[in-house]
Amino acid sequence: MLRQLFDEPNRQDDGNGILQSTLRMIDQFCHAVRSQERLHERFYRLELFAASFASVLDELEQSRYATEKFGRRVHKKYESEMTEQELEDYRLFLYFYKNAFIRVFSTLDKLGYFLNELFEVRTEKVKPKFSYFTVLRQMHRRKIHAGLEQQLYNLKMRYRDPMQRLREKRNTEIHYLNIELLNDLTAVKRQFADSMRVENIEANMADLDEAYDMVVQSLRTVFVYAVKYVD
């Protein structure tokens, strides 16, 4: 859908990438649940929830793609040096970058809910509003499906640094500052500076790419395991 912004066709999947592999595992899980004659009712609810991950992943991938495309159009290091078109592209980069890193954590939290329900972790008894990472800690503490938990923990640690940087930005965006206040602060700052240096687009994209990989790999790991669990 967002590729239409760049007069491009919809994403063409070759079927060999990790995104397509993950989507296939989600489909296999849903099929495995439907093919069972006797399963607890919660599995049928989980099938519906699992199927929604296809659109969740598609939206995340599109946001990441748009972020990259608009970022490539920005070349100047200071806003004062930009043409109106480049400044607009920079603002769109920021918009989709924010959208993408918020989606990273919302997707993981949905995965946490799925794990919590699938394996009856009961994280809500410890923390009513819990995150994906809280579920992982509960799985570790209670030794629930330790093999899967270890794989997910390894992914968490592999991508720890970029995820921490994005978490700080997400927390600032959601809990502390909104875009209107940021604009007000920017206007004030411009009174005391001739130029505003732009975000480090290359570094931001590197973090976002790492976070995207972490999300997709975590989902694939979960659904590879979940398919075997319900078979």
Image (cartoon, helix red, strand yellow):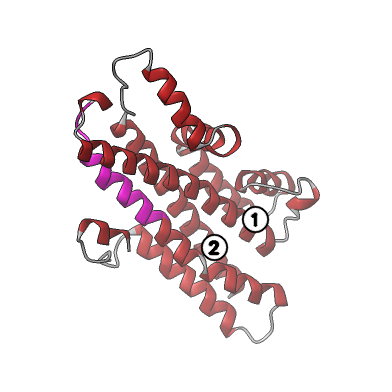
Would residue 208 be counted in the magenta stretch?
A: no
**Secondary structure beneath disc 2?**
helix
**Where 211 falls versus 43 (above or below)?**
above
The residue lying toward the viewer, choosing from 48 and 80, is 80
**Where 222 falls versus 68 (above or below)?**
below
- Tell me, yes or no, whether the two marked residues, 1 and 2, touch with CB atoms within 8 Å: yes
| Chain-order first, disc 1 or disc 2 | 1
Q: Residue, x 40% and y 61% (percent of image)?
A: 58
> Dominant secondary structure of the magenta stretch?
helix
The magenta-colored residue range is 60-76
Q: Quadrant of residue 216?
A: bottom left
Q: Amino acid at mark 2?
A: Tyr
Q: Is residue 20 left or right of residue 86?
A: right
Where is mark 2, residue-wise? 225
Would residue 65 be counted in the magenta stretch?
A: yes
Q: Position of residue 199 (x, y in %)?
A: 34, 29
Q: Position of residue 226 (x, y in %)?
A: 56, 65
Q: Position of residue 15 (x, y in %)?
A: 29, 67
**Where 9 falls versus 68 (above or below)?**
below
Q: Residue, x 32% and y 64% (percent of image)?
A: 1
Q: Is residue 165 left or right of residue 206?
A: right
Give the alpha-carbon distance from disc 1 to disc 2, as whole Å: 10 Å
Where is mark 1, residue-wise? 145
Q: Amino acid at mark 1?
A: His
Q: Quadrant of residue 50?
A: bottom right
Give the position of the C terminus as an image quadrant.
bottom right
The residue lying toward the viewer, choosing from 14 and 229, is 14
Q: Residue, x 48% and y 37% (percent of image)?
A: 179
Q: Is residue 83 left or right of residue 160?
A: left
Residue 231 is at least partly visible in this image: yes
